[in-house]
Amino acid sequence: MYKSIETLLVEIPTIRPHKMAVATMQTQTLVLIKITTEDGFVGWGEATTIGGLGYGEESPESVQTNIDTYFAPLLKTLSGLNIAQTMQIIHRNINGNRFAKCAIQTALLDIQSQRLGIPLSELLGGRLRDSISVLWVLASGDTEKDIAEAKKMITAKRHNIFKLKIGSRPLEQDIEHVLAIKQALGSEISIRVDVNRAWSELTAIKGIKMLQDGGVDLIEQPCAIQNIDAMQRLTRKFDIAIMADESLMGPQSAYELAKCNAASVFAVKVAQSGGLIEACEVGKLANLAGIDLYGGTMLEGPVGTIASAHVFSTFSNLAYGTELFGPLLLTEQILKKPLQYENFELKIPTASGLGIELDEDKIDKLRRK
Ligand code: MUC
Ligand code: MG
């Protein structure tokens, strides 16, 4: 049934350095998987991460090695099974590796929805919207450059919500930077910050107080991944939204976080969740627990971005929008027709499957040989 299972590492420079507490990116390495079936269907998936091993537990190289060595041979023995049965056997045989599992599941869902002639969102229960709002991340590291970048985005109707990456500088400098941007853009523009787990609880208490008073709307992952107790205390202490990102690693951790009220918003990421179906489960769990949702990114290229968009289109509550801007941070496009960003939103394709067409010549030029 599966004729070939290929993995590709595609190197694309970013439009500017992207500075985060965990890494500074100048290039993104897209991790793509292409599955071709004997009867001529081609499905794509993506397992891109950020900063090598700086962000997640899987690196581009480890995903490629693990898919080529373990996943692909196993998958080739599983012909005739549906996606649920296939993923169950994969889970029984392979521990961890959420990013790789997500990429494989995405490609299988792409194939199945093409086979059925429906957009992938319909296989996940059905979309509630045809487009989703997308914010932009200001991370040049320079306050004036960030303000100019934001103003350009607002004028072009590309983005009107901004997330600022902080945590790598002393607290006072970070706060000054954020509040200067908030003041320059005005009260209408929503400003959020992502600390990428850089603060201790005490620093977080000081920082969040100042940011809340300055009109910032949301604090993302202030403390360490495992420090759920601190997240819980901060969520209780402040009115401002506290969002779990790195701490949220799929349905089980969504349950743990929800159970102890350790966040008021969840940043759902398909790869961190371990798959598109699991990301939907996280969304459902958040709904039941009264936690708001935000559509996160691992700064994927167009495959992971549009797969995420299909998932987020099914969420009944997407109160904080999404950050699906990954392809816009890259200097090269790898689709025959680029994703449609307009009026501050990303359009979700209506064609079957993921609804995108890869430019394989371009990919071949950019891939690591
Ligand atoms: C993160 O921590 O949210 C998402 C957008 C961005 O700039 O970095 C990522 C990771
Ligand atoms: Mg984050």
Image (cartoon, helix red, strand yellow):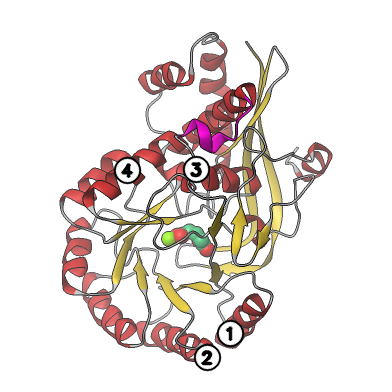
Check residue 127 in the rendering and tell me which mark sits there, or answer none. Answer: 3
Mark 1 in CB contact with mark 2 (< 8 angstroms): yes
State the SS at label 4. Answer: helix
Q: Does the residue labelled 2 lie within 8 Å of ligand 1?
A: no
- Mark 2 burial class by Cα count in 10 Å: few <14, some 14-19, many 20+: some
The image quadrant of residue 201 is bottom left
Mark 2 — residue? 184
- Looking at numbered disc 4 in the image, what kind of residue is underneath it? Lys
- Distance between the alpha carbons at the discs numbered 4 and 2: 37 Å
Residue 165: where, in percent of width, then height?
47, 71
* Residue 168 visible here: no
Separation of marks 1 and 4 at Cα, in angstroms: 36 Å
Which of pointers 3 and 2 indicates the residue nearer the eye?
Answer: 3
Mark 3 residue element: loop
Residue 121 is a magenta residue = yes
The segment highlighted magenta reads 117-124
Could you give the CA–CA distance between mark 1 and mark 2, rounded to whole angstroms?
A: 7 Å
- Please give the name of the residue rendered at 46% of the width and 43% of the height, measured from the top-left corner: 270
